[in-house]
Amino acid sequence: MIEMLPFYAVLLALAVALEPLAVRLRLPFAALLVLLGFAGSEVWVALGQDAGLRWHLFEELVFYVLLPVLVFQAAYTLDARALMKNLVLILFLALPLMLLAAGITAALLYYGIGHPSGFPWMAALIAGVLLSATDPAAVLDLLKRINAPRRLQVILDGESLFNDVIAIVLFSLLIALATGQQESADWTGAGLSLLVVLCGGIAVGAAIGGAGVLLGRLAIGPVQRGVVTLVAAYGSVAAAVQLGFSAVIAVLCAGLLLGRAEQGAGGADADSALSTLWRYNAWLANSLLFLVAGISFQVVMFTDQWLAMLIGIAAVLAARAVIAFLLVPALERLPGTERLPGPWHVPLWWGGTRGAVTLALALSLPLSLDYWWTVQSIAYGVVLWSLLVQAGTMPLLVKKLGS
């Protein structure tokens, strides 16, 4: 383990050095991280060293270390007032429309690949769910640099926060069904179990988040409040896991409560110490995820699975188009929903990129599933497309449309 530390330390140092280059070239930083991880691992292995990646470590690293940080930071720093103004649209995008997009993507993958034995419906459903987790981090970073409309940023960010959580929960359920950990025939029981898991996670997150708010009021400074947020984030995960509830739902609720309390106290602005702490945590977690993705990346993915990747990209874009151009305009007629300016439907479609969460779920696929390699390859292809094409062209698109 100690022998691997210099390798990862060098990669993180290079990542820090490359970030200004990404800003100057107007490239998504995540794309450079993937390329850095791939190039660094090739050099490291050529020197006869071991990068130390083991599949059995991925699940714990992803679900109990990295994802809690990303979910808590997104919930903690989300603009609560702007979220409430667009809550109806965001919840529809993140819940029923996300499920519909996952179903459309799964169907297009299943019939597009056309190999029921090698890529059955369960494989298509798993792929559809992990590809339904939007991650506009790279897009938002570029949109902020061009001063894109704040409301567009809030909608993309809020949608991502909630649909990531649902995607993670559904992914875990499908993996349990696929690996035989849960009885696949008992869909009613599975649905009730899912409801208990979700409600239990909400209760745990609310309890720990509420306790964190009270404890934070007793803290004498930002350092102590920062410790409270860290304890609340990982404490909610630990408690939920011990009780058999959803850890990601728990950490989401804890983050929303603590973030709202800080914003109400006027302390969670962009320059506050706590905001800086969680930006640092999220930067480190995101960087490690994309670096690990690059390290685990193999050229053979593109030589063997290029057609599946293309089908995956087309399926994701088609499903997102149905949401952005057909269903969102219909939802805008609902009471309490402010209509979007006409041109916004295009960046809403193109800005539904995939990133850290999709990679995290793909990296945690059990090797016991015969189709894990195909699903992981599709995920890698879609994420690279999102970073290199969609995120890279999003600022130009927004400027051209005058959004």
Image (cartoon, grey):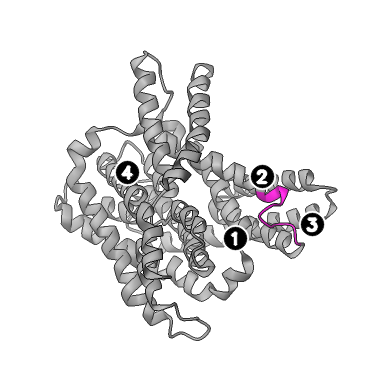
In percent of width and height, residue 379 lies at: 32, 47
Quarter holding residue 230: top right
The percent position of residue 61, horizontal first and vertical second, equals: 50, 36
Tell which circle, 2 or 3, labels the residue nearer the N-terminal end. Answer: 3
* Separation of marks 2 and 3 at Cα, in angstroms: 20 Å
Q: Nearer the viewer, mark 4 or mark 3?
A: 4
What residue do we see at 41% from left, 44% from top?
25
The front one of 130 and 262 is 262
250 shown above or below 41: below
What residue would you read off at disc 3?
214
> Mark 2 or mark 4, which is nearer the start of the sequence?
2
Measured Cα–Cα span from mark 2 to mark 1: 15 Å
Write down the residue under mark 2.
277
Q: CA distance from mark 4 to mark 3?
A: 42 Å
Q: Secondary structure at mark 2?
A: helix
Q: CA distance from mark 1 to mark 4?
A: 28 Å
User: Farthest left residue?
Assistant: 114
Please provide percent x and percent y for residue 30.
43, 43
State which mark lies toward you, 3 or 1: 1
- Which comes before the other along the chain, label 4 or label 3? 3
Label 1 amino acid?
Answer: Leu
Looking at the image, residue 1 lies above or below residue 373: above
Please report whichever mark, 1 or 4, sits nearer to the chain's N-terminal start: 1
Residue 217 shown left or right of residue 149 in the figure: right
- Can you identify the residue that label 1 sits on? 78
- In the rendered image, residue 272 lying in the magenta stretch gets the answer yes
> Is tag 2's residue or tag 1's residue first in the polypeptide sequence?
1
- Is 196 above or below relative to 50? below
